[in-house]
Amino acid sequence: HSRELIPNFLHTDTRRIIIFLRSRDQWRSASSCVNSPNCREGNNQTTDDVNVRVEPYENSFGLDSVSLQRNRACVAESQQPPVVMSYGIGEPLSLAEPQEVDLKQSGTLKKYLEDRGLYESQKEAALREEVLGRLDKVIKEWVRDASAMQGIAEPLLSELNAKIFTFGSYRLGVHGPGADIDTLCVGPRHISREEDFFGLLYEKLQAMPEATELHAVPDAFTPVIKFKFKGISIDLLYARMTLGNIPENLDVAETSTLRNVDRGDEQTVRSLNGCRVTDQILRLVPNIEHFRTVLRCLKLWSKVRGLYSNVLGFLGGVNWAILVARICQLYPKAVPAMLLSRFFKIYAIWKWPQPIMLQEIEEDTTLGLRLWDARRNPGDRMHLMPIITPAYPSMNSSYNVTDSTLFLMTEQFKIADAICTEILMTSKEVDWTRLFQPFPFFDKYKHYVMVQVSATCEDDHMAWEGWVQSRLRQLIAIFQMHSYGCLLLHPWPFELSDGENKMMSYFFLGMQQRKQPPGTQALKHFDLRNAATEFLAKVNAWNGLKKDMSIVIKHLKQKELPNFVLPEKVALGGRTGMGRGQRRKAVAPGTN
C-alpha cells in the first residue's frame, strides 16, 4: 500500500527510514514493532539518531512463507536507488501522479477551449491537407520548369525534386480555425532564392486562380512569400541546399542536413531552423497531448492579455512553446490544469536572465555556426529574457524583449498565478473564464502614444505598415532613453483601423511613470518631442519609402482616444477595426 512512499524516505538526508509494507494493517503494526525488542535486535536503531529499517518477518507480522518471499523481494527492490526518468536538463521537480480532481479540472479546461472555438473542424483539417498536397505538386513543377530554363534536359529533368515541410503552430498541432500554415520549401543548389523563388514561383502562383493575396517580402530577416491558397493562409520560406537534387526522404531535423548548406547562407539556416526547432520541441516533451492543450491555453491567454507579439518585444509562438515544454519536462506526469498552474507559478518568480533551455546546447566544431552563449559572447549577456531554441545552432528566440515588456509579462504571470490558485482551490465547479479575461488596455493608462501609418495603395500600405511595426521597439528604446528610464511603455500588439480608410492604420502605446526605488527622485515631466523626431528620422530612412507613405506620432490623454479603439468584432490575433460610433469600454482583442 505504501510503496509510493519509499522514494521520499530514501531521499531523507540525516534520518534514514525505509518502510515497505503490503497493507494498512501491517503499517499500523510497524509503529509498535519499531520499539519492540525483536525489532531492535533484527534491525538497526541507534540512540543518537533515527536510522530505522522496518522489514517484514514472521515474528512481527505472522506472514505466511509466500507473502514473506514477496515482501522480501519488494524490500530488496526498494533498497535500490530510485529510477527517475529525466526530461531535458536535470531531474523533474515532481513525479506525482494526477488525482481525480486534477483530471476533472483538466477536462473542464479542454472543454472551455473547445467552447471558445480554438479547434478547427474536420472539414477545415481536410482542406489544409488538400492544400498542402496541391502545393507540393506546384513546388515540384516549378523546380522542373526552372531547371528546364537552365538547359537541364531529360531524363535528369523528370527526376529533379523539391520538398515542403511544415513548422510553427500547424506542425505543433496547436493551430486554430483560420490560422496560417508556416511552410518551408527545400530546393536544390541550382534553384536560387532571388530569381527562381521570388521570380518564377511568384509568377506561377500569380497565374493560379486558387492563389490570392500574394505578397512577397524578399528583404525580411527570413524572406517569405505570403498568400492564400483556396482560402488557407500560407507563409512560404525557401531553403537552398548544396545538393544537386532533394531526396524524398530528406530529414531536416538531423543536424547533418546543415552540412549541405553554404556557410554564408544565413537565410537558409534560419529557414531550416524553424522546422528543426519545432520537431525537436515535440521530441523533448514527455506527453505531447498535454503539451498541446497547455500551449493552446497560453496562446489564448497571451493574446487576450496583449502579450503575443515577438516583433513588439513580447513573446511569439516558438517562445511560448519552449516555455510550456520546459514546464512539461519538470512535471512529466502532470495533466494540463496542473501544468498551467505550474507555468504561471514558476515564471512569476523566475530569475531572468537565467536562460530557459530544453536540453544542453549542442556544439559542432565542424559546422562552426554561431551559438548563443552568454559566457563567450558579450552581446548575449545583454539579453533580458533568454529562451533558447533546442536545435543546433541554438539561438535566443526572445532577443526582442525589452525592459518594459519583461516587466509587463512578469506582472501578468503573477496575476495569472493568483487566479489559477483560486480556481483550482475552489470546491465549486471550476470556471476558467476569470483567467482569460481581456486586458483593459485603453482603460489602463492615462497617457498614450498613437502612431498613424498611411499610404495610397494596398501594397504600399501593407509594406509600410509592416516596416513601421517592426521599428516600434526602437521607439520604445528611444523614449526610455530620453526619459532616463523613468517611463514604462506598453505596446499594444494589434494594429487598429478606423473602419473608413483602409489605407490608414494605427498603433498604440500606453505610458506611465515607472516606480522608482525608495530615496530616488523621479522625474515628473517629460519632453519627448526630440525622441519622436529621432524615431521618425530612423523610420523614414527606409530604402522602400515612397512619396505616398506617411507616418504621424501623437500624444493622447485617455479622454482624447479616438472612438474606434474598441473593435466590435475581432478575430484572435487578427487585424481589428470598427466604424465610428459611441465609444464603449475598451477590451483586448481575442474576445467574443
Image (cartoon, rainbow, N blue to C red):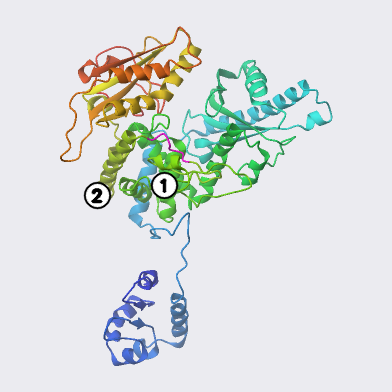
Going by the image, does 81 lie left or right of 447? right
Q: Are marks 1 and 2 in contact (CB under 8 Å)?
A: no
Q: Locate residue 577: give its quadrant.
A: top left
Q: CA distance from mark 1 to mark 2?
A: 34 Å
Neighbour tally class for label 1: few under 14, some 14-19, many 20 plus, Cα within 10 Å = some
Asked if residue 290 is among those painted magenta in the image, a careful observer would answer no
What secondary structure prevails in the magenta region? loop
Task: Work out which quarter of the rendered image holds the N terminus and state it.
Answer: bottom left
| Residue 213: x %, y % from top left | 54, 17
Give above or below for 560 relative to 322: above
Q: Disc 2 marks which residue?
A: 426
Query: Mark 2 or mark 1, which is nearer the start of the sequence?
Result: 1
Q: Amino acid at mark 1?
A: Pro
Q: Disc 1 marks which residue?
A: 355
| Residue 408: x %, y % from top left | 30, 36
Residues drawn in magenta: 396-401
Name the residue rendered at 39%, 87% in the picture.
57
Q: How many marks?
A: 2
Name the residue rendered at 47%, 67% in the picture.
83
Name the residue rendered at 50%, 40% in the picture.
173
Task: Work out which quarter of the rendered image holds the C terminus and state it.
Answer: top left
Residue 557 visible in the shown view: yes
Q: Amino acid at mark 2?
A: Thr
Q: Locate residue 13: give its quadrant.
A: bottom left
| Residue 249: x %, y % from top left | 69, 42
As drawn, the label of residue 67 is none
Name the residue rendered at 59%, 19% in the picture.
211
- Judging from the image, what secondary structure is the residue with disc 1 in? loop
| Residue 210: x %, y % from top left | 60, 19
Give above or below for 486 relative to 297: above
Taking depth in this image into account, of 342 and 427 the one nearest to the observer is: 342
